[in-house]
Image (spheres, rainbow, N blue to C red):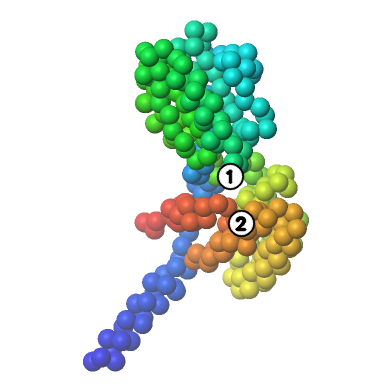
Amino acid sequence: MKKILFGLTIICLFLITGCGNKNIKLDLNKVSENITNLKSDEFARVEAATLLNENISDLEEVYNVKKTFGFNLDADVYEDANIATNKKKTAMYFIIKPLDGKKDEIKKIIDKYMDSLKKDVKDKLAFEDYQDYLIYIIADNSKDLLAKVKECKNTLFNNLMDVEDLSETFDIDNKLVSEHLVKVPMMVINSNSVIILKPENGKTKEVKEKMNTYMEKLENQWKTYLPDQYELVKNRLEEEYGDYLVYVISKDNDAVFDIIKDAKIEEK
């Protein structure tokens, strides 16, 4: 009896992890659309500034901090910044990403300015040190705006292009693959990629070998170019999902793979 139960268990596991997975069908159009809209956890400074400009009246962008506020922020102390104020300086925002080691210096300068404001203006201040950014908002609803600003996130993928001719990029004859979705960078400044291939019957080994060669080339390409991108390539996701071969190079491979799995077409 134990042997029978054991045998049934093995068969069930086989069906779950083996044959069952082979019947998977993906909606690749859905994958493509959802990947394009997928947000990362990285703060989107420009999107945040746009949101504040739309929600605080009469703001004007500030390009000369010294002339506008009376204090100086040299370009050698910050990496990125969006600053705006109204003419009366009763509403404003600072979104600043300090350079390494300069955060305390910048914060001290701006805090001093904030302390000099009239009490009714200063009382509206909402501040947060968020993802390496110093964010100051003075508005009637500054706390609500700060919460919305923190929800501004960059998309995970930018400037990807679709590849139809697999031979040019991967040295894979299109006849070896029945379905594919390939998104790779338009410019050689990042390694982000999403590659989904469904080999024809009996061609999986050949396609995998071609992809292994391609990934080795990618590693060699980035190894001496940009270390952060090399790490992404090294830590890529490689999965067999049913008959599909899935390769993801990104800062959040699990989130991308979840989107791919969510595009599974349920059998009726």
Q: Residue at x 55, y 52 (%)?
A: 251
Give how far across and how far down residue 76 sits, in percent.
Answer: 68, 32
Q: Can you tell which quarter of the image residue 109 is in?
A: top right
Give how far across and how far down residue 93 sits, in percent.
Answer: 50, 22
Amino acid type assigned to the residue bearing label 2 in the image: Leu
- Please identify the residue farthest to the left as the structure is shown: 1
Binning the other alpha carbons within 10 Å of mark 1 as few (below 14), some (14 to 19) or many (20 upward) gives many
Secondary structure category for the residue under label 2? helix
Give how far across and how far down residue 99 sits, in percent.
Answer: 61, 38
Q: Which of 41 and 67 is in front in this view?
A: 67
Q: Residue at x 70, y 66 (%)?
A: 216
**In screen coordinates, is 2 left or right of 132?**
left
Query: Which numbered mark, 1 or 2, is in the foreground of this view?
Result: 2
**In screen coordinates, is 188 left or right of 77?**
right
- Please identify the residue farthest to the top as the structure is shown: 88
Q: Does residue 51 appear anywhere in the picture?
A: no
Q: Nearer the viewer, residue 72 or 65?
A: 72
Give how far across and how far down residue 27 sits, in percent.
Answer: 49, 51
The reply to whether callout 1 and callout 2 are in contact (CB within 8 Å) is no
Q: Which quarter shows the N terminus? A: bottom left
Q: Residue 138 carries which label?
A: none
Q: Does residue 186 appear anywhere in the picture?
A: yes
Q: Residue at x 68, y 55 (%)?
A: 227
Amino acid type assigned to the residue bearing label 1 in the image: Phe
Query: What is the C-alpha distance between the residues marked 1 and 2?
Result: 13 Å
Q: Which of marks 1 and 2 is nearer the N terminus?
A: 1
According to the picture, the residue beneath numbered tag 1 turns out to be 157
Q: Which of 200 and 40 is in front in this view?
A: 40
Q: Which mark is residue 232?
A: 2
